[in-house]
């Protein structure tokens, strides 16, 4: 992975927003999402320090669709020590967070993403010949990678058995081979998604293609690795595609067409092509690098995967997050479709949304509740406090290039009794009474 530029932490990171499975039509061929959360929560089962890497959704283009992704916000749990954001060779954005924790602490991130599909083309050729050569930017997708043993003799033999002179036929043959020989591992996906998985390294939980061939069991992520490995051995450029719901499939590159979706869990041959990306929010595109899962951590430390999706609002507490990173949207774009660029920061007792916009050099923070809204132009390097509908939101904004970091982000109910005042009263009142009694006694004696 690339070495990112350091960004100090105790903050929250912004760039995107979406309500899960909420869509607004914007004309033929265009569909716009409102904010969609990508939620990862891990519980540490031992003391230690790690660097946690997570792929942050990115804009994406293939033959089927063009998806523009706006990463409105990333909230990072308050025990983060430092934060980095960088881009890999394929175009994935990665969030790298340094954590020091005690047993039982949580590592969690919440990314708000907004996306729109601006093009869709479902026309796939019936037959495509293998090219004599491949473009330089496509060649890496023929290479071996971590858990992708392209040069293994068993893999090469399978590829040779099912390959033909036609790329489409080759793809169908290999997909059918995988589905004929593999059963769906429901128990593994259940453990992964219900928070019962204890692991030192998430990658140890995943079968590589040789293990899948031996066991005959796999879920979508493992089957995508298996099929991608065999297809690469058959000289079909292939990459995996994971969306924000942790569903994984493959994409194959066809000369004259480009990248095309192929479903690795197809039931019938005609279901292989195409797979529409209208409702997909990309999470990670895999090339031949070591980045084969949307998140991982080093060194290997015992963790419990508590949550990989935003299953319920009750699991979210804004005050568990101390850092906010945001890439504000231009004010003109925000005003054309404000719902698309808002994200939730409070879920109980009532819904409150937020947004950050840019107007020249001015950065404005918006709070929205129903049809009410308040805005504040931020003062950099100072604590900014905003009162709105019974809430007090405060943070210290710092500019880092085109990213705004909101340090010490906190939300309180306005007028809420501060427990520190109670502690102060408990200590001071008896002291004052004792002092008064002593003083009165001394005065009486005198």
Image (cartoon, rainbow, N blue to C red):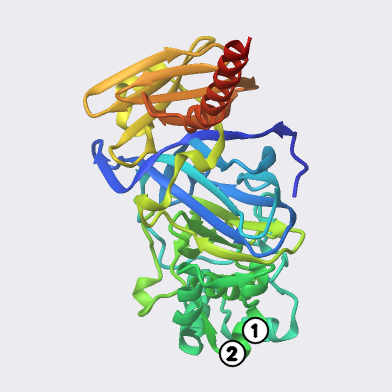
Residue nearer the viewer, 229 or 69: 69
Residue placed furthest toward the front = 445
State whether residue 418 appears in this view.
yes
Residue 178: image location, x then y, percent: 51, 82
Residue 315: image location, x then y, percent: 41, 53
The answer to the question of whether label 2 and label 1 lie on touching residues, with beta carbons closer than 8 A, is: yes
Residue nearer the viewer, 386 or 204: 386
Q: How many marks?
A: 2
Residue 407: image location, x then y, percent: 59, 27
Label 2: how many Cα within 10 Å (few below 14, some 14–19, many 20+) = few
Q: Residue at x 33, y 33 (%)?
A: 352
Residue 200: image location, x then y, percent: 69, 68
In the displayed structure, 317 sits above or below 284; it is above
Residue nearer the viewer, 24 or 304: 304
- Residue that numbered label 1 is attached to: 211
In the displayed structure, 228 sits above or below 67; it is below
For the residue labelled by badge 1, is the local secondary structure a helix, a strand or a loop?
Answer: helix
Q: Residue at x 58, y 79 (%)?
A: 163
- Residue that numbered label 2 is attached to: 215
Q: Which mark is residue 438?
A: none
In the displayed structure, 388 sits above or below 237; it is above
**In the visual, does 355 lie left or right of 336?**
right
Q: Residue at x 75, y 56 (%)?
A: 48
Residue nearer the viewer, 116 or 37: 37
In the displayed structure, 406 sits above or below 271; it is above
**In the visual, does 262 lie left or right of 325?**
left
**In the visual, does 328 lie left or right of 150?**
left
Q: Residue at x 75, y 34 (%)?
A: 5
**Which corner quadrant holds the C terminus?**
top right
């Amino acid at each position: 992975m690339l070495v990112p530029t350091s960004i100090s932490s105790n903050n929250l990171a912004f760039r995107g927003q979406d309500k899960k499975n909420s869509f607004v039509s914007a004309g033929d061929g265009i569909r716009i999402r409102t904010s969609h959360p990508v939620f990862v929560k891990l519980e540490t089962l031992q003391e230690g320090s790690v660097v946690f890497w997570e792929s942050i959704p990115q804009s994406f283009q293939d033959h089927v669709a063009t998806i523009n992704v706006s990463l409105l916000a990333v909230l990072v749990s308050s025990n983060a020590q430092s934060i980095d954001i960088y881009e890999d060779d394929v175009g994935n954005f990665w969030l790298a967070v340094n954590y020091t924790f005690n047993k039982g602490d949580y590592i969690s991130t919440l990314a708000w993403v907004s996306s729109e599909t601006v093009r869709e083309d479902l026309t796939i050729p019936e037959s495509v010949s293998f090219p004599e050569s491949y473009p330089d930017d496509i060649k890496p997708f023929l290479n071996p990678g971590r858990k992708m043993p392209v040069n293994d003799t068993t893999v090469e033999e399978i590829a040779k058995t099912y390959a033909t002179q036609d790329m489409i036929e080759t793809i169908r043959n290999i997909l059918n081979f995988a589905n004929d020989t593999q059963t769906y591992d429901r128990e593994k996906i259940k453990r992964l998604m219900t928070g019962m998985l204890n692991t030192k390294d998430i990658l140890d939980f995943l079968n590589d293609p040789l293990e899948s061939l031996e066991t005959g069991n796999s879920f979508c992520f493992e089957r995508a690795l298996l099929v991608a490995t065999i297809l690469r051995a058959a000289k079909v450029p292939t990459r995996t595609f994971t969306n924000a719901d942790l569903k994984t499939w493959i994409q194959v590159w066809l000369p004259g067409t480009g990248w095309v979706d192929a479903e690795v869990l197809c039931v019938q041959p005609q279901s292989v092509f195409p797979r529409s990306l209208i409702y997909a929010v990309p999470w990670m595109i895999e090339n031949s690098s070591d980045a084969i899962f949307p998140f991982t951590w080093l060194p290997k430390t015992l963790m419990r995967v508590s949550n990989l999706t935003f299953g319920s609002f009750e699991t979210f507490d804004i005050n568990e997050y101390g850092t906010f990173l945001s890439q504000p949207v231009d004010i003109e774009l925000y005003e054309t479709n404000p719902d698309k660029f808002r994200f939730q920061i409070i879920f109980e007792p009532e819904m409150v949304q937020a947004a950050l916009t840019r107007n020249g050099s001015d950065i404005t923070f918006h709070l929205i509740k129903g049809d009410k809204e308040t805005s504040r132009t931020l003062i950099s390097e100072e604590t900014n406090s905003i009162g709105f509908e019974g809430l007090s939101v405060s943070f210290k904004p710092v500019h880092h290039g085109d990213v705004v970091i909101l340090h010490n982000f906190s939300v309180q109910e306005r007028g809420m009794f501060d427990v520190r005042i109670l502690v102060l009263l408990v200590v001071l009142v008896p002291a004052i009474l004792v002092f008064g009694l002593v003083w009165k006694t001394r005065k009486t004696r005198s």
